[in-house]
Image (cartoon, rainbow, N blue to C red):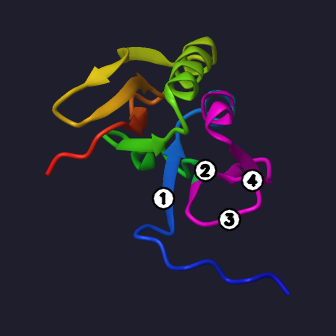
């Protein structure tokens, strides 16, 4: 029997893509350096989670209609270190993402982070907290 994980602030987040294939390619490449892999897949759904831990997760789905595409979302993924943030950025750019902010240290947040846009323009971030603001 598998142990039930402790509750998280967020269980899952759903993103509805205008071009599922392009978005799946983007998220699969961008999230791999963060140890986030597709754990469940069909022809129109890909659910991503940390290997062996299915919560929290990101559910990527083909939008049922054009009007239901997710736009304006900002989601940040935790990275293990600066190298993982750099790898996220490089992979995301190679997989069809566009630059928002290249990797750098943000003193106001105490974090090293990079920001890219997914194929639908959503703001996808990878960050590693290096200091906590009090």
Residue picked out by circle 4: 51
What SS does tag 4 mark? Answer: loop
Q: What stretch is highlighted in magenta?
A: 29-58
Residue picked out by circle 1: 13
Residue 116 quadrant: top left
| Residue 36, magenta (yes or no) | yes
Q: Distance between the residues labelled 2 and 3?
A: 17 Å
**Mark 3 or mark 1, whichever is nearer to me:** 3
Q: Where is residue 103 in the image (x, y as percent from the top left)?
A: 40, 17
Q: How far apart are marks 4 and 3 (CA)?
A: 8 Å
Q: Position of residue 70 (x, y in %)?
A: 41, 45
Precedes in sequence: disc 2 or disc 3: 3
Residue name at image x 49 percent, y 25 percent: 82
**Mark 4 or mark 2, whichever is nearer to me:** 4
**Mark 1 or mark 2, whichever is nearer to me:** 1
Q: Is 91 in front, or is 42?
A: 91
Q: Residue 123 carries which label?
A: none
Q: How far apart are marks 1 and 2 (CA)?
A: 11 Å
Kindly check if marks 4 and 2 are in contact, taking CB atoms under 8 A apart as contact. no
Precedes in sequence: disc 1 or disc 2: 1
Precedes in sequence: disc 4 or disc 1: 1
Q: Position of residue 100 (x, y in %)?
A: 34, 18
Q: Which mark is residue 61?
A: 2
What SS does tag 3 mark? Answer: loop
Q: Position of residue 99 (x, y in %)?
A: 40, 14
Query: Local crowd at mark 1 within 10 Å, few (<14), some, or many (≥20)?
Result: few
Q: Residue 54 carries which label?
A: 3
């Amino acid at each position: 029997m598998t142990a039930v994980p402790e509750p998280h602030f967020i269980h899952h987040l759903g993103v509805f893509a205008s071009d599922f294939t392009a978005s799946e390619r983007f998220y699969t490449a961008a999230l791999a350096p963060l140890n986030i892999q597709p754990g469940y897949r069909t022809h129109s759904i890909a659910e991503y989670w940390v290997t062996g831990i299915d919560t929290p997760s990101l559910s990527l789905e083909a939008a049922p209609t054009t009007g239901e595409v997710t736009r304006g979302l900002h989601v940040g993924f935790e990275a293990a270190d600066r190298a993982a943030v750099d790898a996220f950025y490089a992979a995301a750019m190679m997989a069809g993402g566009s630059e928002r902010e290249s990797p750098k240290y943000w003193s106001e947040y105490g974090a090293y982070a990079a920001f890219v846009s997914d194929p639908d323009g959503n703001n996808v971030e990878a960050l590693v907290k290096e200091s906590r603001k009090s």
